[in-house]
Amino acid sequence: MNSLISPQSSMLQGGLWAKGVFKEGTEEQPLITVITVVLNGQNSIRNTIENIRNQTYQHIELIVIDGGSQDQTIEIIQSLDSKIDHWISEKDSGIYDAMNKGINLARGKWLNFMNSGDVFFSNHVVKELFLGRDFGSTLIIHGNWEVRYGVSKKRIAISGNSNDLWKGSQFCHQAVFINTTYHKSHPYSAKSKIVGDFEFFYKTWKAGETFLKISETVASIESGGISDMKRKEVLKSWESIIDTDLKSSFYFLYRYSREFLISMIKKVST
């Protein structure tokens, strides 16, 4: 087990990099960085790591950023040390601070965030998407995703269009691949608690950068995340980020009204 305490801090770290093993890519098979952020994820972290490692595409580096878990997460990560390229565990100031740490470490041409509890939709997704494909000047690639409701109920969510970002988020973070060089120079706002990813995508779109919508289903996620649980707060945060005008004001008024009606229906039915 190659884990150690950094002499400069209380950070715990390990993985293949500590053994001098670094993956590389080629022009036709670029290196892809998958970043997994976790905090107290003992019930989900193993499945996420195993899913990433079961990808048939060989040029994937996995970076795990743990926020100082107090359950068995660290022990599980240590037991999977040989399957992780690099992992660190230390306290952070929130999920976007943790994500930025992963971005700074990333060595791949493209990066993806597959956080604890999330998985790729199939073992062939990354290979089918990147093997021998040239995306030119594209900076953001976004696809569809599966949403899991408990054990048996599932649905496929279709990725929206980047031109509709003024309405709020149009795609799932886990179903997106981002140009690493661009992301390093445009990190997430660490001050944000729940919509730092949307702010990044919106500003990228407003800057005129190239988005590519693909038809593939990329990721599978569980329902009940922060965006699901705090719908009104998310809507207010989206509206505070976009450039508001009469059209967007009417649109968000409609969204607020819809959320209110949904909440009232739920109260009546319980």
Image (tube, rainbow, N blue to C red):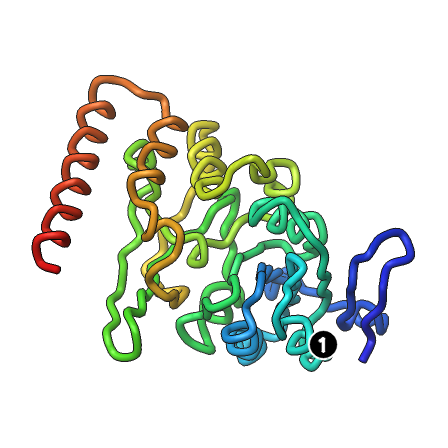
268 w.r.t. 78: above or below: above
* Residue at 49% over, 40% down: 196
Q: Residues within 10 Å of mark 1 (few under 14, many from 20)?
A: some
Q: Using the rendered view, name the quadrant where residue 194 is placed.
A: top left
Please give left or right for residue 204 compared with residue 249 in the image.
right
51 w.r.t. 67: above or below: below
Percent coordinates x, y for residue 122 in the rendering:
42, 76
Between 229 and 33, the residue placed more toward the observer is 229
Q: Which secondary structure, mark 1?
A: helix
How many marks on residues? Answer: 1
Between 217 and 129, the residue placed more toward the observer is 217
Please give left or right for residue 20 compared with residue 54 in the image.
right
* Residue at 51% over, 78% down: 47
Residue furthest right as drawn: 7
**Type of residue at label 1?**
Gln
For the N terminus, the quadrant is bottom right
For the C terminus, the quadrant is bottom left
- For mark 1, what is the residue? 78
* Residue at 26% over, 71% down: 154
Percent coordinates x, y for residue 216 in the rendering:
35, 64
Percent coordinates x, y for residue 203 in the rendering:
47, 31
Percent coordinates x, y for residue 42 in the rendering:
56, 73
87 w.r.t. 77: above or below: above
Q: Using the rendered view, name the quadrant where residue 61 is placed.
A: bottom right
Residue furthest top as drawn: 246
Please give left or right for residue 220 compared with residue 66 in the image.
left
* Residue at 33% over, 29% down: 239
